[in-house]
Amino acid sequence: PAVRHIVFFRLKADTTTEQKEQLVEAMRGMPAGEGLKDIVKALRVGEDLGIPHPSGPNASIAVMVDFESQEGYEAYAKHPEHIKFFESFIKPIMEPGSRNATQAFLAHALLLFAQCFVGSADLDILLRIAIAGDVGSADIVFFRLKADTTAEQKEQLVEALRGMPAGEDLKDIIKALRVGEDLGIPHPSGPNASIAVMVDFESQEGYEAYAKHPEHVKVIESFIKPIMEPGSRNATQFNIPEVGQV
């Protein structure tokens, strides 16, 4: 199955506008590279929109890359052109410890999260992501479970998450919801997350209504918080400016 890779990070405070523009331009040019054009199926870059969240600072940049298969992602990850790009454009201006990434299988045109790498800092970022259908917004959250979490607790959590769109008060707010579980692809940046959730909304206002909705808060308090490893939560919220574009 096809795989989608998403990575996001903060830029150092002294990063110039020119450096940021060079970074984004270099990212968008990667699929045209002679060595990557047959590996990278699609690549999109998003910049932070700045919705604050109590869990931590926003990331500055996010990149979404699609591949035909897991093998395609693995070839990309170790490809010299990708490594050169990382060393030349990202590393010099990336805030240390701010990188987070996910790799996930794609189900049709929609993202089903399954593999999440959790870095050292909690991030809440705004990006842009393509979803099938209308212009809207998406929220992605991923976290690790405590080591003593039982299979029953995990099943109850996943069931509660998947049941939210059917709730009387949330069915008109949530456009779509997907839950993914870790696939276990190792990465030197840090340990894998256990669970990832992606929720789609008609608009940013829909996300904001969902974020503070009592039914959503109840799921967090009753099913997530008791078994989530403290400090492992990461999240992104995306505005979708145009269908199929990021």
Image (cartoon, rainbow, N blue to C red):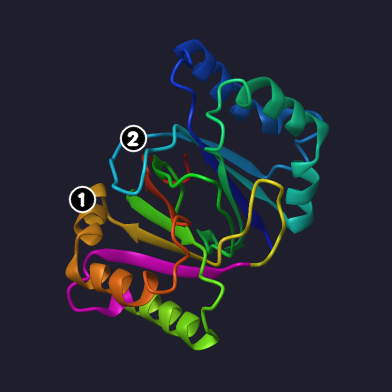
Q: CA distance from mark 1 to mark 2?
A: 14 Å
Q: Considering only order in the chain, which callout, 2 or 1, is on the residue closer to the N terminus? A: 2
Identify residue type, mark 1. Glu
Residue drawn at (45%, 55%) of the image:
231
In percent of width and height, residue 163 lies at 34, 80
Element at badge 1? helix
Above or below 127: residue 228: below
- Position of the N terminus, as image quadrant, is bottom right
Q: Nearer the viewer, residue 165 or 77?
A: 77
In this orientation, does residue 162 appear?
A: yes
Q: Is residue 41 magenta?
A: no
In this orientation, does residue 171 appear?
A: no
Q: Which residue is mark 2?
A: 49
The reply to whether discs 1 and 2 touch (Cβ–Cβ < 8 Å) is no
Identify residue type, mark 2. Leu
Q: Which residue is mark 1?
A: 205
In percent of width and height, residue 202 lies at 27, 55
Residues drawn in magenta: 164-182
